[in-house]
Image (tube, helix red, strand yellow):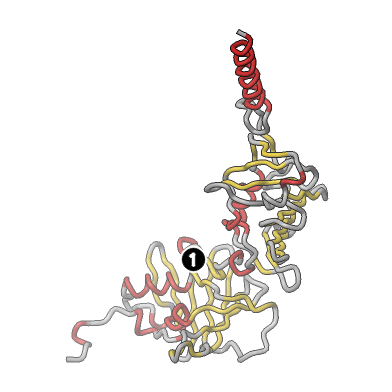
């Protein structure tokens, strides 16, 4: 009986220990309240944040007085940041919560990559009140799941909804690519000057017509639509800074006028890239918009239709005028 009694008592002890572990082990409680990992921060009150990777490279973001964000590597010029991406990352950061406390033990920090010196990413966020909160982003045990430690404590949490790859430190990936973006519905006039001459289109009601002596010429629908599409949306390949020492931007001038503004884009000649594997890479054109403080480059694929555009390309051709 003694052995049997001891066995029963031992089994009861094991059960009690298992129950205690289930209830009190970090992150196991089903009713554990969610912990905000950036308390008091929201997308509207953040004015700066930086991302540092495991190699020490830092990406710096700053909100300008007008509300627009700029991005830099912390050493050079800051360039316009992609607004849509910024909204997404701000929403993700400020909504980070966890119901799973993984550990409070500093000795676990290196293993989980949330140590002060060994980490996947370090995120420092500053609010309008000047307060800065820093999160160390560590290893990822599963999809959209990372270990996170606020530097103010030793607590390590398991957070969902964030990946390390979202917080990359390549400046170019955060740039605003839409260098010229004008709503075609608001466009009233478009003028293009290049080596083939000058043409001006004006909108009357829902239709476009040539201005000046060519006003009576009938326009071809598809070519005009393609021209408007290309002229109102130019995507940059690189930002070049606020000064340009290269060739004059005299290949073409594009002027876009709406009810609210007039944007002038000067375009330089094509500059060929270095050959790759014996093949000449696509060229680029330096461009400068009056709506931007920065010179930039755009691909020849986008620009050639503008530098090569002729007035006759937009005019409806008579069947009898075509060569046999």
Where disc 1 sits, the SS reads strand
Q: Is residue 306 left or right of residue 253?
A: left
Residue at image location 23% in from the left, 82% down from the top: 318
**Quadrant location, the N terminus:** top right
Residue at image location 43% in from the left, 68% down from the top: 203
> What x and y, as percent, mark residue 150?
74, 45
> What x and y, as percent, mark residue 49?
72, 56
Q: Nearer the viewer, residue 257 or 174?
A: 174
> What x and y, as percent, mark residue 176?
59, 65
Q: Residue 13 appears in which quarter of the rendering?
A: top right
**Quadrant location, the C terminus:** bottom left
Q: Residue 291 appears in which quarter of the rendering?
A: bottom right
Q: Nearer the viewer, residue 307 or 279?
A: 279
Residue at image location 38% in from the left, 82% down from the top: 214
Instruction: Look at the picture and state if 129 lies above or below 119.
Output: above
Q: Nearer the viewer, residue 115 or 80?
A: 115
Question: Badge 1 local density, few (<14 within 10 Å), some, or many (20+)?
Answer: some
> What x and y, as percent, mark residue 193?
50, 85
Q: Is residue 49 left or right of residue 298?
A: right
Q: Nearer the viewer, residue 77 or 316?
A: 77
Q: Which residue is mark 1?
A: 187
Farthest top residue in view: 1
Farthest left residue in view: 324
């Amino acid at each position: 009986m003694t052995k049997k009694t001891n066995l029963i008592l031992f089994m009861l002890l094991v059960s009690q220990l298992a129950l205690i572990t289930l209830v009190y082990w970090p992150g196991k409680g089903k009713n554990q309240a969610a912990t905000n990992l950036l308390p008091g921060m929201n997308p509207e009150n953040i004015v700066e944040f930086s991302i540092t990777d495991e190699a020490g490279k830092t990406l710096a973001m700053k909100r300008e007085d007008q509300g627009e964000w700029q991005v830099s590597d912390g050493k050079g010029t800051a360039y316009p940041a992609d607004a849509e991406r910024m909204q997404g990352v701000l929403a993700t950061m400020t909504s980070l919560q966890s119901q799973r406390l993984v550990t409070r033990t500093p000795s676990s920090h290196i293993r989980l990559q949330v140590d002060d010196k060994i980490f996947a990413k370090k995120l420092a966020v500053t609010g309008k009140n000047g307060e800065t909160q820093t999160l160390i982003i560590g290893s990822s045990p599963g999809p959209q799941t990372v270990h996170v430690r606020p530097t103010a404590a030793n607590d390590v949490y398991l957070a969902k909804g964030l990946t390390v790859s979202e917080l990359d430190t390549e400046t170019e990936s955060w740039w605003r690519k839409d260098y010229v973006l004008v709503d075609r519905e608001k466009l009233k006039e478009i003028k293009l000057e290049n080596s083939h001459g000058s043409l001006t289109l004006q909108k009357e009601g829902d239709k476009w017509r040539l201005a000046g002596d060519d006003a009576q010429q009938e326009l071809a629908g598809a070519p005009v639509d393609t021209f408007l599409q290309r002229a109102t949306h130019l995507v940059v390949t690189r930002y070049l800074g606020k000064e340009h020492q290269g060739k004059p931007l005299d290949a073409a001038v594009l002027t876009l006028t709406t009810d609210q503004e007039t944007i002038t884009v000067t375009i330089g000649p094509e500059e060929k890239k270095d050959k790759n594997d014996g093949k000449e890479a696509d060229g680029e054109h330096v461009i400068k918009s009056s709506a931007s403080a920065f010179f930039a480059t755009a691909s020849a694929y986008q620009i050639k239709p503008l530098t090569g555009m002729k007035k006759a390309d937009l005019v409806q051709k008579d069947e009898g005028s075509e060569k046999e």
